[in-house]
Structure formats: structure tokens, C-alpha cells
Image (cartoon, rainbow, N blue to C red):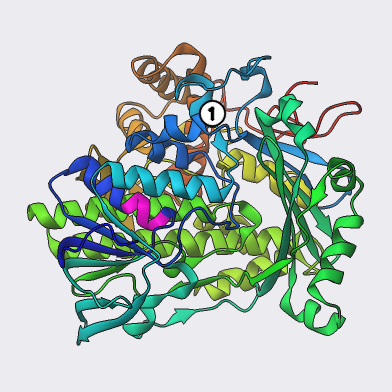
Amino acid sequence: MVTSVAEHYDVAIIGGGPGGATTAAVLLKHNPDLRVAVFEREVFPRDHIGESQLPPISAVLHEIGCWEKVERAGFPVKIGATFTWGKTTDPWIFEFLPVANIPQEVERPGRYQGWRVQTAFQVDRSTYDKILLDHAAELGAFVSQGCRIKAIHRAGDRVDAIETEDGRRVTARYFVDASGNAAILRKAMGIEVTVPTLLKNVAFWDYYTDPAWADEDDAKATRIHIRSLPYGWIWCIRIGPTRFSVGMVCPAEYYKESGKTPEQMYDEAIASDKDVVRILSRATRRGEVERTTDWSYVVDRTYGENWFLVGEVAGFADPILSAGLTLTQTGARELAYTILELDRGRLDRPWLLHRYDEVQRRRVIQHMRFAEYWYSANGIFENIRENCARIAADAGLKLSPQQAFQWLARGGLEDDFPGQVGIGGYDLAAVKQLMQRFTGDKAKWQIAGKNVFKLNLANAEKTTYGRLENGRIIPTPCYVRGTTRLPLMGVFADLVEALEQSSDIETITEYLRKNASLKMAPEHIQVTIQHALGCLEVMALNYWVLCSTRKGRPALDVESPIEGAIMHTVAEGESITMPHG
């Protein structure tokens, strides 16, 4: 149904999924006067995989005023994940926050505050995507569902108009392709993609329902289940009070050589794991195995003269890290801010475009690198360190296996958000803990045993990065040296300020503690200090900080425990679903 007959808009978006809907919502949240149109070929609701989120999405939902709507839908609160992966077959848990911070009784609906800021949702996309698109419409977007694009009219690198199958010719000042795998505008503009050779997988999935699940408490706070197979892995995601999404992933070549049907591959994989079998023992299966290719790729560029690519049309990283929706919706926010600033005309256009392109492609590539490392620990590749060297070589770096292994903790772990360090829900401390769980080797910290830290800006060039805040991109100082950068924002800015005042670790730590006490509740201060140490480690690995030891003075005692509050082996009698029990 066409909800608008207008032919000209400020922004015309192809695709009404999370990428398109979030772009529209952020634009209209910060400039309600814009004329924004969204053209979606399907009629929502419709099923879609990619149901498990990471916490950065919650911040985006909160910004556009949609978090409460998603919360009221009753999707399970995601607090982490359980895995069988690595050196042993014992299940282990990764948490977004210590379980002790989660109340015994989780009240729903809740508010975006306290411990909920550190969590995510596991969503039924048929409901979630409709909430997002309807919210964009409520903010003022002109939404056309069941509307297919017939043609893209272009002149060189410029889009003149899009033509719909119902005969409409739509012009706009900006065009956005958020059409996912359909890649409608991307293909029309001839944009190439790069496909890494290490991760070429296929996925098969189906859905299960059981009304009795609605009475279980783990519908309120739960974890995604990832179960390793000799040739791939299984996911099991609770996406609603009575519904689970269950699928399996394996290399495309393995599937091809097996000679089995998708149904046979799927049935054998699901039956092989006792935890998944137990969870689904009473459930009714839909009985329709779907499949897709999960090949990681990234585009050569994400923008043209008056058009942009956002979400999976611009790049896709293997789903092992559950990062798909997060990359899409945080990318949509970045795009909306970019368009808003282009309209204001106060910031340099080439800088804005380059910034958007660099951020989007870098994040996808980083998730690819980390996913490849993750797979190497599952027996798909024999030697983890050798594979790290291959990953580094793919990134244009000639490193020894040991150097590449160390690089993965810094080069593959740049900021998901400026001023922070993390990827796939893991901060640097968690990644080091993960590495030793995978390899059996004790993780090393560059800053451990040191107490003198001197800022090192030799041969660094001072430039600008961009901080997103209240609909504006704020140019922020940033140091660049070679391929590394030091953004003066967030925790990094706090560290630089502390290092400019003192090189003594006690003084630095006290400065960070006092600064944190001015910004946050007491219960969050220690977590912030721990995260700051992770950032300090990255600065040391990249030589932004030179560290040494002065005798007779207290030194940093930093290590990665095998078992901890964030990551630990499932104890006997411990629930793999509920945070308590």
C-alpha cells in the first residue's frame, strides 16, 4: 500500500528493515522538518534471521525514543551467551555484566537505566522490524510497503531518480540503499565487493514454538546458545515468550561435498547437541528449513555523489559474534548524522564522507578478522597463530605468527565507538581471557608490573575525528601515527589528561577515579577503571605510552583469570539460561 504520492523527498531510502528504519528515525528525531521516504518491497510483519543483539543497539533505540516500545514487546533480555568452543567441550558463559548486578526478579517492562543499559534484546524480527518501521512513520517518515523498485536512473555517479513498479518516479536530494542482500542501488551503481577467502559459510535454520515456555522465567533474562560442531556451529536463540530460532552454520564447501540436503544437514546438527535437544524437547517445529549464504564481504566504497550504502548492503561479517544488527543500526545512526551535517554545511563535505566510509568499512573488517580468529579456535584451522598471521597478511601487514597474535588484540580491536575499545561485545580484558581459553596459553599484559607511564606523541600528526552527540558530529582532536590512531575522546581523553599531569600509576588511577565519580554512579566506577586499563594496554601496545618500572613503587597487578565474573565455565548445577539458579 502506498501511503504517499509525493514524488520528491529530502531523503529516499530503499529498504525498511532495521538499517532503513533506523536511518529514517534518527534523521527525523533530530530534524523533524525533513521529508524522508522509505520504500520496502515486503509487507511487514515478516520473518528474518539475525535475532541476537549487542548492547550498543539499546543506546540507539533509546536515542530515537523506541527503546520503551521494544521493551514492551516482551523480547527476552539478553545478558550474554553460552558456548562450547575452543580447547574443551565444556560449556562456558560470557556475560555483558556480572550476574551479581542483575536483580533476582527481573521486572518487565523495565526502564533504560541501571543494569539494563549494559544489556541487549533477543528479538523476533517479524515483530521487531515492524516496531522500528512503524516508529519511523510515527516520527514523520513516508513509508511505502509492498513497493518494489523497478529501476535506478543514474547519471555517472549521481542518482537522478528511482522508479517503482507501480509507476512512481521518485527524486530526492539523497538516496540511501538499505536493501540488504538485494543491493538494489549498489548493483545499479556498479559498486564492487571484496569477499575474504577464509569465511565462506552457509546457514540453515527453522523456528520452534511451545506455549509452556511462556511460564518460564528465562523469557525475562537469558543468553544465546552457541554450540560447536566439528564442521561448524549451532545457534539457539529465544526470541519471544514461546518461540526459539535454531540454526546451524558450516563451510559452503563442506555442505557441497556432503551430498546431503539442507534438511538432513540441519536435523543431524540439531540432534548432536544434548542441551539444544533438551531445550526443544517439548516444542513444535515449524518444519520449513531455510538457507542462506553467510559470506563475509565489504564494499569498495559506501557513498557516491548523492547516495549512500548502509547495513548489510555495505558489508557483512560472519554471524558468530551476533554483530549483524549492531553493525547495521549503529551504522544507520552514523549515516543519519552524516546527512544532517551535510545539510548544515558547517563541516567539510569530503571529511564527512571519508569519515562515514572509513568507520563503516573498518568496523566490518574488524569483525571479520575477529570472527576468523574465533573460527581458528574451533578446529577449522589447525594452527591458531599461523592463522592470525594469515589474517594480518590479508590486512596488508607482514607479521610473524606471534606478532600477528598480539596484533589481533589491538589492530583487530579498535573502537566500536570512539573513545572505547571492544568488539562483538568483548572489551580488551575479555578478549585476552578468551584467547587463553582458546589456546591454553597465559595471556600477557604489556602494562603488568609497570608503574611509570609516559605519553609518547613522537612523529604523531594531530588531526580530527568525529564524536556523535545530539544529532551533531563534533570534530574532536585525534593523533595519527602510521596505521594507528589515538582519539582524544571518551576513556582515551581521560587517560591522556591524566598522563599529561603525571607518569605515576597511582596518581593516574586516582585521577581517573575522581573523574569517573563526577560522571557516574559509584557502582560503575570500578568497571570504568578496569576499562581504562584496557585502553591503557592498547596505548602501550601501539606505543602511545612508554611504560617502565621504578623500584620501590607500587606497580600494576593485571592479569586475565581463566574464570571470572564475565567469563567462566558452567559450574555443576548452574543454569545455562537463567542468570540465577
Give left or right: position of 58 versus 278: left
Residue, disc 1:
530
Q: Residue visible at 18% across and 51% down?
A: 340
Residue pushed farthest top? 522
* Residue 28 on the magenta segment: no
**As displayed, is residue 384 above or below residue 167?**
above
Q: Residue visible at 34% across and 34% down?
A: 65
Q: Residue visible at 61% across and 41% down?
A: 445
Question: Quick one: SS at disc 1?
Answer: helix
Mark 1 is on which residue type?
Answer: Gln
- Placement of the C terminus among the 4 image quadrants: top right
Q: Residues within 10 Å of mark 1 (few under 14, many from 20)?
A: some
The span shown in magenta is: 19-23
Q: Nearer the viewer, residue 477 or 4?
A: 4
Q: Nearer the viewer, residue 370 or 53?
A: 53
- Total numbered badges shown on the rendered structure: 1
Q: Residue visible at 72% across and 46% down?
A: 244
Q: Nearer the viewer, residue 401 or 294?
A: 294
**As displayed, is residue 353 above or below residue 187?**
above
